[in-house]
Image (tube, grey):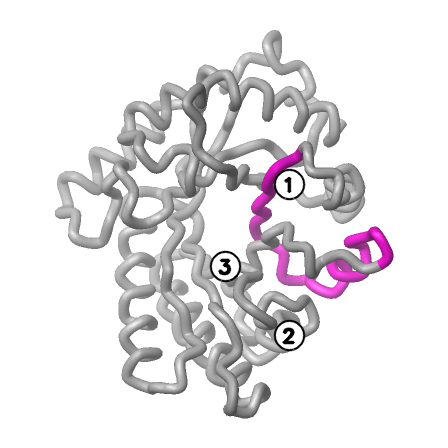
Amino acid sequence: MLSERTYPNLRVRMFALGLVTYNLGKDWDVEALISNCVKTGFQAVELRTTHKHGVEPFLGRDDRISIGRRFADSPVRLLSLGTTCEFHSREKKVVDNNVNEAKKFVELAHDVGALGIKVRPNGIPEGFPEDKTIEQIGEALRKCGQFGERYGVEIWLEVHGKHSNMPLVVKKMMESANHPLVGICWNSNPEDIEKNSVEKSLNLLKPWLRNVHIRELWDKKYPYGELFKLLKRFRYSRYTLAEIHSSTDPIRLMHYYHALWEELST
């Protein structure tokens, strides 16, 4: 485990800090990811597809076992796989292809020891009934969840896309999916905020909260302090994953980010 001497608040906080490879870690292989996270106190990673880590469905059995062991033997948890699978298209064939791709990532997640995969909506198509799109997304999520049952892998819908990132719309998607392995990945969007607060939006989606993405903590337009207090109140005990821009000095940035996260979340 990470050193409590270096990061003493790890003993008392219910949730921990991790990293999404989009975009700070996009150019790191698995060894560099683990090493850099250990150096800076990041306890988990979400491996976004197409990045240098190379953890993709085309990997063979031996490579999958090797990657799983590398993370299992380290202090850094391989939490999730970030896919670009999306289910909002008006074309059934496109939706079916994305469901099949998500299933491949479910199998991969199982083999490398990840808890879940991230999928997304990427908007609500214009000129098509919104309720039909929501129902379609819910059905696709349910199929993925049912497939995930075989492997013990969760499906996390990122709160993402134009209008499809509105909390009330996402709530309807979750109600349509109606599967215990299907939840949401909170994405720290401006649309979460109502009257300078995210409490109403988080309360709306709390029953399905499975993962949390956080962005630039210095940006006071988003109430991260309140978000962290609410997560503690709701007894959220997983990870808050930093999804931040790349840097010419990434280790220094990660140290600063961790320090600010400590300040805001304690």
Which image quarter: residue 239?
top right
Residue 15: x and y in percent read: 64, 36
Give the residue type at disc 3.
Trp
Tell me the residue that label 3 is attached to. 156
Tell me the residue that label 2 is attached to. 169
Query: Mark number for residue 237?
Result: 1
SS under mark 2: helix
Horizontally, is 263 left or right of 243 in the view?
A: right
Asked if residue 97 lies in the magenta stretch, the reply is no
- Between disc 1 and disc 3, whose residue precedes? 3
Residue shown at 34%/86% (left/top)? 91
Along the line of sight, which residue is nearer the eye, 141 or 261? 261
The range drawn in magenta is 195-217
Q: Residue furthest top?
A: 5
Asked if residue 201 lies in the magenta stretch, the reply is yes
Give the residue type at disc 2.
Val
Give the residue type at disc 1.
Ser
SS under mark 3: strand
